[in-house]
Image (cartoon, rainbow, N blue to C red):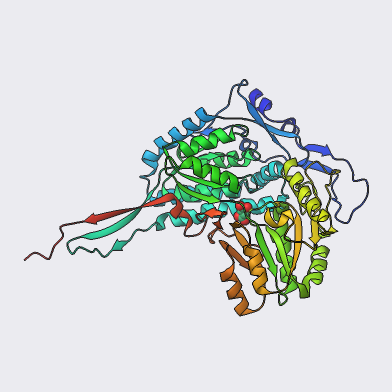
Amino acid sequence: MQRLTYLLGPSLRARPVLRRLAQPASAGFFRAPISTHTVPTLKDPTLLKPFPFLDNEFLVPTASQSTFTVADPVSGQTIAQVPDQGVEDVRRAISSASTAFKSFRHTTARERANLLRRWNDLVLENKEDLATIITWENGKPIADARGEVSYAASFLEWFAEEAPRVYGDTIPAGVRANRIITQRQPIGVCGLITPWNFPAAMITRKVGPALAAGCTVVIKAPGETPLTSLALAELAKRAGIPPGVLNIVTTLENTPEVGREMCSNSTVKKISFTGSTPVGKLLMRQSADTLKKLSFELGGNAPFIVFDDADLDIAVAGAVISKFRSSGQTCVCANRIFVQEGVYDEFAERLSDKVKEFRVGSGYNTNTTHGPLIHPRAVKKVHDHVEDAREAGAEVLLGGKKMEHLGMNFYEPTILTGMKTEMRLYREETFGPVAALFPFKTEKEVVELANDTDVGLAAYFFSKDYSRIWRVAEALEVGMVGINTGLISDPAAPFGGVKQSGFGREGSKYGIDEYTVVKMMTFGGIGDLQE
Ligand code: SIN
């Protein structure tokens, strides 16, 4: 207990925590209604485990080991000090996963399905606590965090259902006396590197198919949000997932060394990574010597296109969800919003009316619609994009400022009009709450603009014209297209990109392929029926 007190920030010890934030100096149109930031008490405090997870045990470190701080993005206060593990630790985790693989690979698909199903049930039973932890370390509003827990569980449920359906083929052989079949076997130990923007769902979207296939895993938990992954690990253990099958390494400062070891260690057969394109390229280079199977879900620069013939109510609702979900911090958030000239002004005005209704503040306030960004670096990037656009002639229709009275990580939901292609935001993903509206004239022009980027994760467009819908959907160079919707996330849908947004698909019937290898068996000497 003493050690736990050492590792957890003061806020966990106060039940419940009440921190008074400065009142805003003057009222703005989406001024946050908050004056308090209250972290609810967990129903099951044993879910908070600020320790690495190895062989189904949480490794309580000695005080002398180095730790990193997990900070509340609303208040900046310490939530926990978590061990900053290094190369030796990740090697131990890989070795543990390797030992576990020897037996786990021989479990039946039904056994693995049952484990995943029990884990899914426990995640849903503990939804409120998991949501509380997500909001605490990530900042997203509690309703969104609850939604994320359901989303996370849905991958466990989906892959529980997929596990018994990993079929092979029988293939007509080219040689008369031969018969050919295939089996899909688990690839082995997988290294999973996940981001902070979906602290739960990005874990289950990778672990679900890995375990369903019979693989074992080492997860590098996101340094900003490790506590959600560790709570999930506790629930995995309670679900009966055997020791060594799921291991979690915690690190922030040592992330580069830990990542390099995962990629270069020959025991690891596959890396799945969600994060930025530059880091994806680095991990790919580091994986080259051991020729690992890779699946990467990397950055995007999503075009969001509103044609003159769109239903503007649907398009505005789509922009609100696609642009401002998680305060703009998802890989599939709209980045460049292209609006055809005939509806440009009306769309801008209607979007502005909706965004004015946002309530920014502590995620625990039930009337908060949008929380903080993850850290000051994120705020700086958003601010830099807005200033760059402003200096190059864009008009700030709404927002455009930091909300320092709320805390260091808040930025006003912003709408920019008169955007031009030479502005930074056209080329770079903002990853923040900035809706940047670019005007366009023709379908051909906008498809060229949409495709004028090295990346291709998601795109959205809004139109009622059946023929245009086919033409544009087929012409967009992305892995995923939302047509008349701003929300495409679904465990049934294959998630992934093209170009420098990566390769491989997560979720869906394809997701499990990333964790299997096809083995072919030829049976020879069969011949004709004997007399
Ligand atoms: C992501 O941001 O990478 C995931 C978004 C989603 O699954 O909706």
What residue is at 66 percent from the left and 28 percent from the top? Answer: 7
Q: What is the x, y in percent for residue 196?
A: 64, 44
- Tell me the quarter of the picture where residue 136 sits: top right
Where's the C terminus, which quadrant?
bottom left
In the depicted view, which residue is nearer to us: 107 or 398? Answer: 398
Residue 66: x and y in percent read 62, 25
Image region (quadrant) for ligand 1: bottom right
Q: Dividing the picture into quarters, in which one does residue 453 lie?
A: bottom right
Q: Nearer the viewer, residue 395 or 506?
A: 395
In the displayed structure, does residue 214 sit left or right of residue 40? left
Tell me if residue 531 can be seen.
yes
Q: Residue furthest left?
A: 531
Q: Give percent across and percent down for residue 205.
A: 54, 51
Q: Please report the residue visible at 71 percent of the width from the left and 77 percent of the height from the top.
A: 309
Q: Nearer the viewer, residue 515 or 394?
A: 394
Residue ranking furthest to the top:
64
Please say whether residue 250 is visible from this viewpoint.
no
- 414 vs 408: above or below: below
Q: Is residue 309 left or right of residue 516?
A: right
Q: Is residue 233 above or below residue 512?
A: above
Point 72% across, 73% down: residue:
441
